Amino acid sequence: MSEVIGLLQQLIRTDTTNPPGNETAAAELLREYLEPAGVECELYARVPERANLVARIRGTGDGPSLALLSHTDVVLADASEWKRDPFGGELIDGDVWGRGALDMKCEVAASAVAMATLAREGWRGAGDLVFIAAADEEVGAGFGLQWLVEEHPDAVRTDYSVNEGSGERIVLGDRVVYLCATAEKMTSPFLLRVLGRSGHASMPSIADNALVKAGPLIHRLGGLTVEPQLLPEVEAFFRAALGSVPAPVDALAAAKALSPLAGELVEPLLGMTASPTVVRASEKRNVIPAVCEVTIDVRLLPGQSPAEAEAALRACLGEGDYELVHLSQSGGTRSPIGGRLWDAAESFVAAEEPGAALAPVCVAGFTDSHWVRDAFGTVAYGFFPSRAMEPEVAARLIHSANERVPVADVELGLRWLLHAARTVCG
Ligand SMILES: [Zn+2]
């Protein structure tokens, strides 16, 4: 059995369910594996049981540096839902089973083995090659990459980084495309506060029921449509998948014609979305509410501002007795499409599968990549290629029961990381 599969099994057997995390066990396992291979390792921990590991092969000059970025924590697994032990790391019919197999101990193991392999060969790049196995990505309570970026910026600052986020192989008509996540949407929730006047529920006419007034406003939000626009990422996706770029109004139909998966992928990328999700009004059955608050989950395209979103929401809601409050914002970062890391991914795909193309994608959620994009301007991509497992199958296993990863995909990912290190650090 290959080295990377053995290490993946050990990582899965190290329970790092977050909360509470206990990522130090994984960080120490990785250090014990890497140091004998000659890789410099350092553990950084805000609290002793939640260590991050940063390992480094120093460059010979000041060439470009690359981080292999990953997280060691996993989400909860309910063993009663699983066909196998979620912390068993069993190898069955070519798949390694267990929590974290896909998200993302496969890439942790591949990154560590890439480091050890290069160190044993005596390889050194012009710039540093850095392996960051961060804690606490799944909860984000401030023990992981966010904390490293703030407290130990020199340890984690690189020109480029490779992380989770994408890498799926999809077939679109007669074309094969591997997806590379170069951008992410921004989460920018709003609170709609509808105003009325309270009163006794037995005499509705003396009051002005804010909950009733909220009804039509919520209904309007449900029908929010925005002028479709094409992000550079979506244009490049179409160019790779179709050979041409449709007009923005035709983009959704063009994506659906390629495949249902392409339709699902492109639809949230054509504009902002707004979903009312939480309503609060009276706490008492017999009191007519003076205020009704509706939380609206709003997702913006990278580059859009909360002010633009507010204007669109107000245009949709029209006149009325309400206030609209912007709650917060996070994510929404992007890296340029092109350059050393892009070229590395493109040449890797071309060598692994002649004729296949690399296409950028903007992800609807977000990963740890946004910390390094924001803090250092790192060119950060989510790219860990997979092709043995269908993307629809993988999407249903992540954070769910019976998570498993094909050995062939872990080995493909390892080949990619070795290629990335050799070509980017030069
Ligand atoms: Zn993850």
Image (cartoon, rainbow, N blue to C red):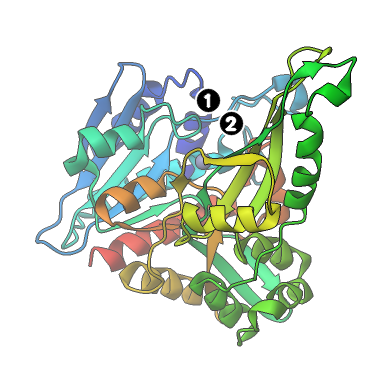
Whether pointer 1 and pointer 2 mark residues with C-beta atoms closer than 8 Å, the reply is: yes
424 and 194: which one is in front? 194
Q: Is residue 303 above or below residue 210?
A: below
Classify residue 384 as left or right of residue 243: left
Residue 393 appears at what percent x and percent y?
72, 50
In the image, farthest residue toward the front: 206
Which residue position is annotated with label 1?
Answer: 13
**Does residue 390 show up?**
no
Q: Residue at x 29, y 56 (%)?
A: 378
Mark 2 residue type: Gly
Q: Residue at x 22, y 45 (%)?
A: 56
Q: Residue at x 41, y 42 (%)?
A: 70
94 and 174: which one is in front? 174
Q: Is residue 109 above or below residue 118?
A: above
Residue 314 appears at what percent x and percent y?
62, 53
In the picture, the disc for residue 89 is 2
SS for dot 2: loop
In the image, farthest residue toward the left: 61
Q: Residue at x 44, y 31 (%)?
A: 140
Q: Quadrant of residue 200?
A: top right
Residue 321 appears at what percent x and percent y?
67, 40
Q: Quadrant of residue 44?
A: top left
Residue 382 appears at what percent x and percent y?
46, 56
Q: CA distance from mark 1 to mark 2?
A: 6 Å
SS for dot 1: helix
- Whether the residue carrying mark 1 lies under 8 Å from ligand 1 is answered with no
